[in-house]
Amino acid sequence: MAYWLIKSEPDSFSWQEQLANIVEPWTGVRNHQAKKNLAAMRLGDKAFFYHSNTGREIVGIVEIVKEAYPDPTDEMGKWVCIDVKACSSLPHPVTLQQIKANPALSELALIRQSRLSVSPVSDKHWDILCKMGGI
DNA sequence: GCCAACGTTGGC
DNA sequence: GCCAACGTTGGC
């Protein structure tokens, strides 16, 4: 099983909305590297749900419940999306500040490539972040 | 509101 | 195919 991190601006789609909707299509990704990551996701993979811009913290965990399919919001049919299901909220959201302050997380794609909205997380990093989040 | 990083576009 | 101009993302 692989781990990922997906970003959303809470102003456009927040963790609270994800919790309320339970299953949500993850659409609107328009970046090739992010698309590659979406396509590599498999059923049962887990992903951190990160609030970018306002918030700047990991707030929850979702599970991939549908693998990559054509993004309905893309008229050209060029981009893909997935479906994610809310799994659990982090008892203690992990802030970007905390992540940056931890040398063990310096290789995290979120830090190295701050603009990438869908990025992989290694098993090791996943464990560290879960502990920091109180899970 | 500013700016760095980075992707995209278009002229050559 | 190169590169300058420009737009967008996201942290601060």
Image (tube, coloured by chain):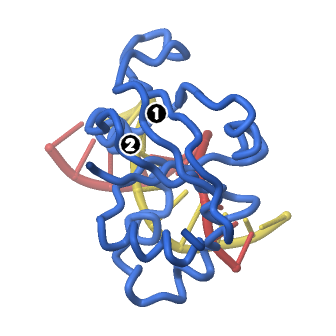
Chain colours: A blue, B yellow, C red
Look at 59% across and 73% down and name the residue there.
A134
What is the number of the mark on residue A30? 1
Considering only vertical position in the picture, is A16 above or below A112? above
In what element is the residue under mark 1? Answer: loop
Q: CA distance from mark 2 to mark 1?
A: 8 Å
Identify the residue position indicated by label 2 in the image. A34
Q: Residue A133 in the image: x percent, y percent? A: 58, 71
Q: Residue A103 in the image: x percent, y percent? A: 41, 90
Callout 2: 10 Å neighbours few (<14), some, many (20+)?
Answer: some
Q: Residue A79 in the image: x percent, y percent? A: 39, 23
Q: Amino acid at mark 1?
A: Arg
In what element is the residue under mark 2? Answer: helix
Q: Amino acid at mark 2?
A: Ala
Look at 39% across and 66% down and name the residue there.
A126
Q: Chain of mark 2?
A: A
Horizontal side of A126 relative to C10 (left or right) equals: left
Considering only vertical position in the picture, is B1 above or below C1? below
User: Residue A76's quadrant in the figure?
Assistant: top left
Q: Are marks 2 and 1 in contact (CB under 8 Å)?
A: yes
Numbered disc in front, either 2 or 1: 2
Considering only vertical position in the picture, is A95 above or below A45? below
Q: Are marks 2 and 1 on the same chain?
A: yes
Q: Residue A81 in the image: x percent, y percent? A: 44, 26
Return the residue nearer the eye: A99 or A134: A134
